[in-house]
Amino acid sequence: MTPVRDNPYVGLRAFENRDRDLFFGRFRESRNVTDLWRSNRLVVLYGPSGIGKSSLLHAGAVPLLYDEKLDVLPVGRASAGGPFPTPSDHNPYTFCLLSSWSPADSPARLADLTVAQFLHNRPKRTDRFGDDVPIFAAIDQFEEVLNSPPPWRIHREAFLRQLGDATKEIPHLRLLVSIREDAIAELLPRESDIAGHSRARVRLSPLSAPDALHAVRDPVDATERHFAPDVAETLVRELCTVEVTDKLHERRKIELDDVEPWQIQVVCTQLWDRLPPDTDEITFDHLRDFGDVQEALTAFCLRMITSVADDFGVPEDVLRKWIYEKFVTEHGTRGMAYEGTNETAGMPNDIPRALEHRRILRGEDRHGSRWYELQHDRLIDPIRRLFESSPQLDVEEAEETIRPSTPTAADYLAAAETALATGEFVPAERHANDALRATGENPGDNALRVRAEALSLLGNLALYQDDGDTALSRFRQAAMVFERLQVPTAVARLLSAVARLLIKARDFGSAITELQSAITRHPSQPSLKRDLAEAFWADGQLNSAIALYTSVIAVSPGDAAALAGRGQLSAEKRDFRSALDDLKRATEIRPSLLENPNIRAAKAVALAGLGRFEDAGKEAEIAVATGPNNGPALLAAAEVAKRMGDQVQMAELARQAIDATDPQLFPHAFMRARDMLYSL
């Protein structure tokens, strides 16, 4: 039996696998999801924020598959909001997903894998007939991928292609993604690319009244307490009952057929925590004194509004007034506000988005526009009470009841990661700085690690905002702390990020020094050697760069990035046959490389060098079309034009290459472009 003091309700957090014995009211939906998951390459589980998608997945559907001893990966996440800088040629969404699917694996092994490669490398399981056992893989909170901020969208598209490649290459893969309803419109046109016609969708709705009764009553059965007759039923009826205003503007109560699961958790958690310790039977008196639905929801609203006000530096009373005036009409019904380009009803758009994440508001796309309203009619009265500071509610007492204990440095860091993943840069920076302050003046090892990760996250944030100097400083500070903690892999990743910034600043010598230092700390990481090869390449040391790429390929013959790098360098050094061989192997291993104008351009140079001018012209044309401001691609196209005897085209492309900025030419390449013009 669970001790009385252990609350059997999980509150606002999602249920986890370890909570499956406390998860009630969703058995029918859990079974439906697993049945569809078995028979489709892609299942999309969607519903409003807070409806319980993550809980259903972790504590409902996945445990049913575990019980049958099927091949089920841990529920994954694909977020780009982690504290560490991503290696230059790695996809942050892929790396995060594979790390969550295989948490015991070393980052070095996962960093160079695509989704399909990771799944291919897993031990193969077959049934007694020799057929492949399906792999059940889930990605939760998929909106983190689709709603990515602009700096990550190139990675998003590549990641979505990887998912499609995985379902095509591994026919027995069964993929499920869980996504908020307001983000599903972004996913719909991509479903066929990911899974063809073998796909299904499941919309998760609120709990029916009978299922809500299970969610209220059944968790208590495993404890030393119990509900008196009809008490749980009365609580469910109160949760189902809302006040509405009819067309005559008269208030009346109606009983709905369903209940939002998070409201059950808010009310029942408060009820349990306030019961006297010696309570065995939960009575109507307890329900009246400790389980008042409106009081619990008002305390919840207070906590969420206070949190958003703190995050964005808005006075709490101003935010309460804004919510009440914009989202509660004069007739006591839910009002709506339109999201403009920068503001929603006078508030920056980040604020209603944050209130949506915290279940105060609900967003909905209508005819290409986004509108917000209160998440539920049940919140109308709590919002009014908070605005009017009703004497029925002692706000300080309610705030004391629901305010959590002082957040730790780790809590602040987790909040910063969540904000960064959804592009909320202002609160991400605030939370990360709070994490730094919370580590104290003489932190222990655990606090030091939080400090290092917070510094690294601030470096990432500066990087996404194009503040290279601040990013450089933060990454170096983080590396120093990890050095003190003797975590060489983290130091290496941070030094690599420093080097990439130095290359961008065209300080190639310092970048080479940083990368050589990184490799001494993590010699088995091929991405560091590839980064060093790029630094040598940028510095004009082509032979050293080729030697490094060759050393990577000797250990990993299928390393597409190293093959592509060596192929481009071989083309530049006029070793056309080797260049074409490397580029062919690289694009066979990773077809998405053909979308890179530099790869196309290098292939064009190699083809022209071998006298295949028609093919070279086509590749050069594609390279220029896909990279019209790409210096290396334009210079390679100029080289092709030169070999084809078109001096006018060569000169024009060389001039464009000199002026190009995305990316600029390296100094030695700039000299080659200038020599082309002088040769006329």
Image (cartoon, grey):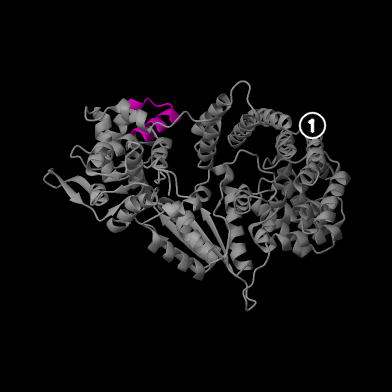
Judge whether residue 309 is colored magenta.
Answer: yes
- How many marks do you count on the picture? 1
Q: In the rendered view, would you say 269 is above or below 179?
A: above
Q: Is residue 212 magenta?
A: no
Query: Badge 1: how crowded within 10 Å, few (<14), some, or many (20+)?
Result: some
Q: Position of residue 170 (x, y in %)?
A: 62, 67
Q: Compare residues 575 and 565 and report the one nearer the observer.
A: 565
Tell whether 259 sits left or right of 439.
left
| Residue drawn at point x = 52 percent, y = 34 percent | 411
Callout 1 amino acid: Ser
Image position, residue 240 (x, y; %): 25, 50
Residue assigned mark 1: 510
Q: Residue furthest top?
A: 441
Query: Percent from the top left, x then y, of residue 21?
Result: 44, 54
Q: Which residue is situated farthest in the bottom direction here?
A: 129
Q: Is residue 258 visible?
A: yes
Q: Quadrant of residue 117?
A: bottom right
- What residue lies at 62% left-to-right and 75% top-to-bottom? 131
Closer to us: 200 or 351: 200
Q: Residue at x 23, y 53 (%)?
A: 256
- The answer to whether residue 338 is seen in the rendering is no
Horizontally, residue 677 falls left or right of residue 597, namely right
Determine the secondary structure under disc 1.
Answer: helix
Secondary structure that dominates the magenta span: helix
| Magenta residues (range) | 302-317
Q: Is residue 50 left or right of residue 122?
A: left
